[in-house]
Amino acid sequence: GAVVSQHPSWVICKSGTSVKIECRSLDFQATTMFWYRQFPKQSLMLMATSNEGSKATYEQGVEKDKFLINHASLTLSTLTVTSAHPEDSSFYICSAHPAGLYNEQFFGPGTRLTVL
Amino acid sequence: AQSVTQPDIHITVSEGASLELRCNYSYGATPYLFWYVQSPGQGLQLLLKYFSGDTLVQGIKGFEAEFKRSQSSFNLRKPSVHWSDAAEYFCAVGATDSWGKLQFGAGTQVVVTP
Protein backbone atom coordinates (compact mmCIF):
# COMPACT_ATOMS: atom_id res chain seq x y z
CA GLY A 1 0.00 0.00 0.00
CA ALA A 2 0.83 3.72 0.11
CA VAL A 3 1.95 4.04 -3.49
CA VAL A 4 2.48 7.39 -5.15
CA SER A 5 2.86 7.61 -8.89
CA GLN A 6 4.08 10.39 -11.12
CA HIS A 7 3.42 10.90 -14.78
CA PRO A 8 5.30 11.27 -16.95
CA SER A 9 8.49 9.72 -15.62
CA TRP A 10 10.48 11.83 -18.03
CA VAL A 11 9.71 14.59 -20.50
CA ILE A 12 11.66 16.62 -23.01
CA CYS A 13 10.20 19.89 -24.22
CA LYS A 14 11.17 22.96 -26.15
CA SER A 15 11.93 26.24 -24.44
CA GLY A 16 8.82 28.35 -24.03
CA THR A 17 6.35 25.49 -23.79
CA SER A 18 4.47 24.37 -20.69
CA VAL A 19 4.69 20.97 -19.11
CA LYS A 20 2.26 19.34 -16.69
CA ILE A 21 3.38 16.72 -14.19
CA GLU A 22 0.84 14.60 -12.34
CA CYS A 23 1.20 13.16 -8.88
CA ARG A 24 -1.30 10.53 -7.79
CA SER A 25 -1.81 8.66 -4.56
CA LEU A 26 -2.97 5.27 -5.81
CA ASP A 27 -4.35 3.62 -2.71
CA PHE A 28 -4.97 6.37 -0.21
CA GLN A 29 -6.36 9.85 0.03
CA ALA A 30 -3.85 12.63 0.46
CA THR A 31 -4.90 15.79 2.19
CA THR A 32 -1.52 17.32 1.55
CA MET A 33 1.02 16.85 -1.21
CA PHE A 34 4.48 18.33 -1.41
CA TRP A 35 6.51 19.17 -4.48
CA TYR A 36 10.30 18.98 -4.42
CA ARG A 37 12.98 19.76 -6.94
CA GLN A 38 16.26 17.92 -7.13
CA PHE A 39 19.24 19.06 -9.14
CA PRO A 40 21.85 16.50 -10.25
CA LYS A 41 23.99 15.30 -7.39
CA GLN A 42 22.16 17.62 -5.02
CA SER A 43 19.52 17.41 -2.39
CA LEU A 44 15.77 17.81 -2.62
CA MET A 45 14.46 21.32 -2.22
CA LEU A 46 10.88 21.83 -1.15
CA MET A 47 9.04 23.97 -3.68
CA ALA A 48 5.51 24.09 -2.37
CA THR A 49 2.88 22.52 -0.17
CA SER A 50 -0.39 21.63 -1.84
CA ASN A 51 -3.60 21.16 0.14
CA GLU A 52 -6.67 19.71 -1.49
CA GLY A 53 -9.15 22.36 -2.45
CA SER A 54 -7.00 25.34 -1.55
CA LYS A 55 -4.17 27.34 -3.00
CA ALA A 56 -0.67 25.98 -2.74
CA THR A 57 1.84 27.51 -0.37
CA TYR A 58 5.14 28.24 -2.05
CA GLU A 59 8.56 28.32 -0.45
CA GLN A 60 10.58 31.48 -0.57
CA GLY A 61 12.20 32.01 -3.94
CA VAL A 62 9.81 29.75 -5.86
CA GLU A 63 7.87 31.59 -8.56
CA LYS A 64 4.23 30.66 -8.17
CA ASP A 65 3.37 31.97 -11.61
CA LYS A 66 5.98 29.72 -13.18
CA PHE A 67 5.21 26.61 -11.16
CA LEU A 68 1.43 26.26 -11.07
CA ILE A 69 0.14 23.71 -8.61
CA ASN A 70 -3.38 22.35 -8.56
CA HIS A 71 -4.63 19.89 -5.95
CA ALA A 72 -8.11 19.28 -7.31
CA SER A 73 -8.82 16.00 -5.58
CA LEU A 74 -7.64 13.91 -2.65
CA THR A 75 -5.65 11.68 -5.00
CA LEU A 76 -4.25 14.07 -7.57
CA SER A 77 -1.98 17.07 -7.59
CA THR A 78 -0.47 18.60 -10.70
CA LEU A 79 2.57 20.78 -11.22
CA THR A 80 2.66 22.82 -14.41
CA VAL A 81 5.94 24.39 -15.42
CA THR A 82 4.91 27.34 -17.55
CA SER A 83 7.05 28.81 -20.30
CA ALA A 84 9.81 26.39 -19.46
CA HIS A 85 13.43 27.35 -19.94
CA PRO A 86 16.60 25.24 -19.81
CA GLU A 87 17.24 26.31 -16.23
CA ASP A 88 13.97 24.61 -15.27
CA SER A 89 15.47 21.27 -16.25
CA SER A 90 15.49 19.18 -13.13
CA PHE A 91 14.09 16.18 -11.34
CA TYR A 92 10.70 16.93 -9.80
CA ILE A 93 9.47 14.75 -6.96
CA CYS A 94 6.14 14.79 -5.20
CA SER A 95 5.13 13.31 -1.90
CA ALA A 96 1.73 12.68 -0.40
CA HIS A 97 0.52 12.80 3.18
CA PRO A 98 -2.26 10.32 3.89
CA ALA A 99 -5.38 11.69 5.49
CA GLY A 100 -5.53 10.74 9.14
CA LEU A 101 -1.95 9.53 9.32
CA TYR A 102 0.35 11.71 11.33
CA ASN A 103 3.95 12.39 10.41
CA GLU A 104 4.09 10.19 7.35
CA GLN A 105 4.49 11.00 3.71
CA PHE A 106 5.15 8.82 0.71
CA PHE A 107 7.24 9.83 -2.26
CA GLY A 108 6.67 9.40 -5.94
CA PRO A 109 9.42 8.12 -8.25
CA GLY A 110 10.04 11.55 -9.73
CA THR A 111 9.81 13.17 -13.15
CA ARG A 112 12.87 14.12 -15.14
CA LEU A 113 12.27 17.34 -17.07
CA THR A 114 14.67 18.40 -19.80
CA VAL A 115 14.06 21.72 -21.53
CA LEU A 116 15.89 22.21 -24.80
CA ALA B 1 15.12 27.44 10.39
CA GLN B 2 16.33 23.90 10.39
CA SER B 3 19.26 22.60 8.35
CA VAL B 4 20.91 19.25 7.73
CA THR B 5 24.51 18.37 6.94
CA GLN B 6 25.70 15.08 5.53
CA PRO B 7 29.49 15.40 5.57
CA ASP B 8 30.17 12.42 3.33
CA ILE B 9 29.21 12.82 -0.30
CA HIS B 10 30.40 9.38 -1.30
CA ILE B 11 31.21 6.23 0.64
CA THR B 12 32.57 2.95 -0.68
CA VAL B 13 32.13 -0.11 1.47
CA SER B 14 32.79 -3.81 0.95
CA GLU B 15 29.90 -6.21 1.00
CA GLY B 16 29.55 -7.62 4.47
CA ALA B 17 31.29 -4.71 6.12
CA SER B 18 29.60 -2.27 8.44
CA LEU B 19 28.29 1.07 7.29
CA GLU B 20 27.80 4.36 9.09
CA LEU B 21 26.39 7.46 7.46
CA ARG B 22 26.70 10.73 9.29
CA CYS B 23 24.01 13.34 9.68
CA ASN B 24 24.14 16.55 11.69
CA TYR B 25 21.22 18.88 12.07
CA SER B 26 20.56 22.37 13.28
CA TYR B 27 17.25 23.14 14.93
CA GLY B 28 16.15 25.06 17.98
CA ALA B 29 14.10 22.29 19.52
CA THR B 30 13.91 18.54 19.15
CA PRO B 31 13.25 17.96 15.49
CA TYR B 32 11.64 15.14 13.64
CA LEU B 33 14.44 13.21 11.94
CA PHE B 34 14.27 10.87 8.99
CA TRP B 35 16.51 8.72 6.85
CA TYR B 36 15.45 7.97 3.28
CA VAL B 37 17.02 5.84 0.59
CA GLN B 38 16.74 6.67 -3.10
CA SER B 39 17.44 4.12 -5.81
CA PRO B 40 17.39 4.93 -9.53
CA GLY B 41 13.86 4.91 -10.85
CA GLN B 42 12.39 4.51 -7.40
CA GLY B 43 10.82 6.99 -5.08
CA LEU B 44 12.41 7.86 -1.79
CA GLN B 45 11.80 5.10 0.69
CA LEU B 46 11.66 5.77 4.40
CA LEU B 47 14.21 3.73 6.33
CA LEU B 48 13.41 5.03 9.77
CA LYS B 49 12.30 8.09 11.70
CA TYR B 50 12.69 9.63 15.12
CA PHE B 51 10.11 11.77 16.82
CA SER B 52 10.66 11.16 20.51
CA GLY B 53 11.38 8.43 23.02
CA ASP B 54 14.09 5.83 22.64
CA THR B 55 17.06 7.45 20.95
CA LEU B 56 18.06 4.26 19.16
CA VAL B 57 15.67 3.72 16.29
CA GLN B 58 15.31 0.52 14.33
CA GLY B 59 14.31 0.69 10.71
CA ILE B 60 13.75 -1.49 7.73
CA LYS B 61 16.40 -3.50 5.88
CA GLY B 62 18.49 -3.89 9.01
CA PHE B 63 19.25 -0.20 9.46
CA GLU B 64 19.30 1.66 12.73
CA ALA B 65 20.02 5.23 13.74
CA GLU B 66 20.86 6.91 17.01
CA PHE B 67 19.70 10.37 17.99
CA LYS B 68 22.33 12.20 20.01
CA ARG B 69 21.04 15.54 21.18
CA SER B 70 24.40 16.66 22.60
CA GLN B 71 26.03 16.19 19.23
CA SER B 72 23.04 17.22 17.11
CA SER B 73 23.51 14.02 15.19
CA PHE B 74 21.38 11.24 13.78
CA ASN B 75 23.81 8.76 12.24
CA LEU B 76 22.61 5.77 10.28
CA ARG B 77 24.23 2.37 10.72
CA LYS B 78 24.06 -1.12 9.31
CA PRO B 79 26.21 -3.94 10.69
CA SER B 80 26.65 -5.81 7.41
CA VAL B 81 25.87 -4.27 4.04
CA HIS B 82 24.49 -6.12 1.05
CA TRP B 83 25.07 -5.26 -2.59
CA SER B 84 21.46 -4.13 -2.75
CA ASP B 85 22.22 -1.35 -0.26
CA ALA B 86 24.04 0.60 -2.95
CA ALA B 87 21.98 3.77 -3.32
CA GLU B 88 21.73 7.42 -2.33
CA TYR B 89 20.86 8.07 1.29
CA PHE B 90 19.27 11.25 2.54
CA CYS B 91 18.89 12.52 6.06
CA ALA B 92 16.00 14.92 6.58
CA VAL B 93 14.69 17.07 9.39
CA GLY B 94 11.19 18.34 9.95
CA ALA B 95 10.13 21.03 12.35
CA THR B 96 7.64 19.97 14.99
CA ASP B 97 5.18 22.63 13.91
CA SER B 98 5.46 21.84 10.20
CA TRP B 99 6.85 18.34 10.08
CA GLY B 100 5.81 17.71 6.51
CA LYS B 101 8.08 20.41 5.16
CA LEU B 102 11.30 18.48 5.19
CA GLN B 103 14.79 19.90 4.91
CA PHE B 104 17.03 17.36 3.24
CA GLY B 105 20.75 16.89 3.50
CA ALA B 106 22.86 16.76 0.37
CA GLY B 107 22.84 12.98 0.36
CA THR B 108 25.49 10.28 0.59
CA GLN B 109 26.11 7.97 -2.33
CA VAL B 110 26.94 4.47 -1.12
CA VAL B 111 28.85 2.12 -3.38
CA VAL B 112 29.15 -1.52 -2.37
CA THR B 113 32.10 -3.50 -3.69
CA PRO B 114 32.29 -7.30 -3.84
Image (spheres, grey):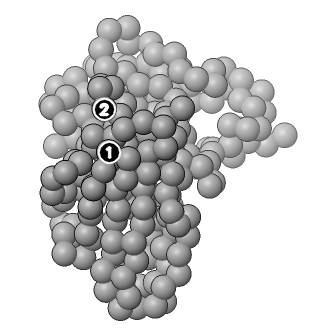
Marks 1 and 2 in Cβ contact (< 8 Å) = yes
- Above or below residue A8? Residue B25 is above
In this figure, which residue is indicated by the disc labeled 2? A99
In this figure, which residue is indicated by the disc labeled 1? A74
- The reply to whether residue B82 is visible in this rendering is yes
Residue at x-position 31% and y-position 20% = B51
User: Which amino acid does the dot numbered 2 rest on?
Assistant: Ala
> How far, Cα to Cα, is label 1 from label 2?
9 Å
- Above or below residue A18? Residue A16 is below
Percent from the top left, x then y, of residue B112? 73, 42
**Horizontal side of residue B112 vs B109, given as left or right:** right
- The N terminus of chain B appears in which quarter of the rendering? top left
- The C terminus of chain B appears in which quarter of the rendering? top right
Figure quadrant of residue A32: top left
Residue at x-position 22% and y-position 48% = A51
User: Which amino acid does the dot numbered 1 rest on?
Assistant: Leu
Q: Report the chain holding disc 1.
A: A
Percent from the top left, x then y, of residue B95? 21, 34
Residue at x-position 68% and y-position 37% = B85
- Above or below residue A66? Residue A85 is below
